[in-house]
Amino acid sequence: MAKITFDGVEVEVPDGTTILNAARQIGGSIVPPAMCYYTPLKGSGGKCRACLVRVAAGSAKDPRPMPKLVASCVTPVQDGMVVENTTSEQVLNVRKGIVEMLLINHPLDCPVCDQAGECDLQNFAFEHGVSTTRYQEERRTFEKIDIGPLIQLHMTRCILCYRCVYTANQITDNRVHGVLGRGDAAEIGTYIENIIDNDFSGNVIDVCPVGALTDKTFRFKQRVWFTKPVNAHRDCPKCSGNVVLWYKGKEVLRTTARKDQYGEVKEWICNECRFEKKETSDWTIEGPAHIDRSSVISANHYELPVLNQSVIADLPESTQRDLEKNPPLKLGS
Amino acid sequence: MQLTNRAKKLEKKPMTLAERAYLPAIFQGLSITMRHFFMKKATVRYPEEVRPFSPVFRGLHVLKRDEQGRERCTACGLCAVACPAEAITMVAGERKKGEEHLYREEKYAISYEVNMLRCIFCGLCEEACPKAAVYLQPDKIAPPRYERDEFIYGKDRLVEPVSPDARSVRGIQLTPEQADSLRNKLAQQPA
């Protein structure tokens, strides 16, 4: 076990834990943001530099500070380590620079992008960046590649986090897409435009922190903040079947896997659940999915209260009619 | 019960001779009425005469086009989410090949509706718009209508006309100054 001090809070974690995961054990606003690190994916992290922290003391044995900021998602803790994140002016300044760096080639087409409203890069830039840009040069563009009828690839929006590559590597047996080219010319491609037709290929949509990989069946259908997320499950022979359905009215517009508070998917879902089951009758509804109050998705969501009509004797007739016409969602058994 | 000591005791005094004569008070009252005949009137004869609008007045919405006459709106939904009255609804669509001269971005609004009965003309939609597409005109009010559904303004009445002299049936009609400036702008455009 190693004891570290993170932003003045002491926490004891097993040896080999990364600084980021130690911070997540403390939780709250001091947790460094992560754009490329993804707990369920082995080998992810260390690419986007969003989680840089300052190590003020390396360990109890050698208390010298580390010379440079380190990526907290790939740096293991050592006993007696002192880490500064929000308490260090340097870290906050560098993070502004990281936002600027990630946005250099990002097209900033949020009004068009389907990811807007649930985009990690949008949140990251909003919370840590500056509201202006100094960049004047031409932004990187790519030829449009069609990677199949289910997934839409927008290479211009990609920040090269490699999450989708690891996903394809680790949860499907034959990876057909990867990163081609080097440096500035690097891009996600399927090489000779192979169509991703694996049964779990849809999960790359969920792991993508930006709008580079989006659901083609949901393309331009509705903005996410006008849809209502509902937890649901079904008996699926291939996957866990635990999903979130995104409703607009009574229509299921989109199905995604469930994400935790750090935006990470815990249970992968198969393409059948994701793309084919778009009827309420396919699913057992569990109840509204929790959406953070700070998220734009929770804006303007007024819901019919779930009323137990037998308890309220003098329910107004108009409300009764409303409830009959538009019954509240039944909670799953 | 007395709550304060500010209560004033009034005594009923007998009327003076002038008051009892009745006529002086009548003439005094009539003189005030007569004076008002010659004073500046507080009202205007509305349909013929219109009061000047304040420069910050927020009136009827317009969906702007860009310099090349393409619709600026991309149906991003920010106006609708900013709207406190939930007056705005839209349906987005993908721009097809060959429609580049009509719409600026690859996504555009197939339908865009503002319910003028719900709208409180607060201008938050204008403030939220990232594409500078929706504006509340400073010199137009939503005119009265007979039917409720006539207050739901669709794209036919909201989108700025391409040609300066064009008028939609019940919607936007440019003022002569606006038409002139638009005509100048179009004249500067290379064909």
Image (cartoon, coloured by chain):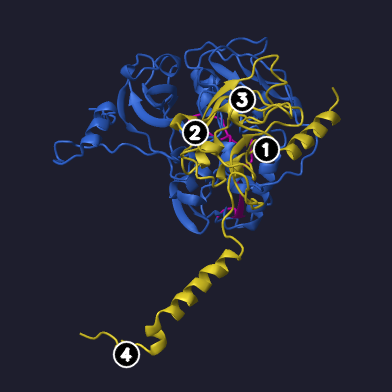
Chain colours: A blue, B yellow
Query: In the rendered structure, the residue with mark 3 lies on which chain?
Result: B
Task: Name the residue beneath numbered marker 1.
Answer: A102
Dividing the picture into quadrants, the one containing residue A51 is top right
The answer to the question of whether label 2 and label 1 lie on touching residues, with beta carbons closer than 8 A, is: no
Considering only order in the chain, which callout, 4 or 2, is on the residue closer to the N terminus? Answer: 4
> Looking at the picture, which amino acid does disc 4 mark?
Lys
Residue A263 within the segment the image draws in magenta: no
Which residue position holds label 4? B13
Give the label, 1 or 3, closer to the camera: 3
Measured as percent of width and height from the top left, residue B34 is found at: 54, 68
* Chain letter for mark 1: A
For disc 2, the chain is: B
**Structural distance between the alpha carbons of marks 2 and 3:** 23 Å
Q: Mark 1 near mark 4, Cβ–Cβ under 8 Å?
A: no
> Are labels 1 and 3 assigned to the same chain?
no
Mark with earlier residue (2, 3): 3
Quarter of the image for residue B140 reads top right
Image coords of residue A108 (percent x, y): 66, 34
Q: Which residue is mark 2?
A: B151
4 or 3: tag closer to the N-terminus: 4
> Disc 3 marks which residue?
B108
Dot 2 amino acid type: Phe
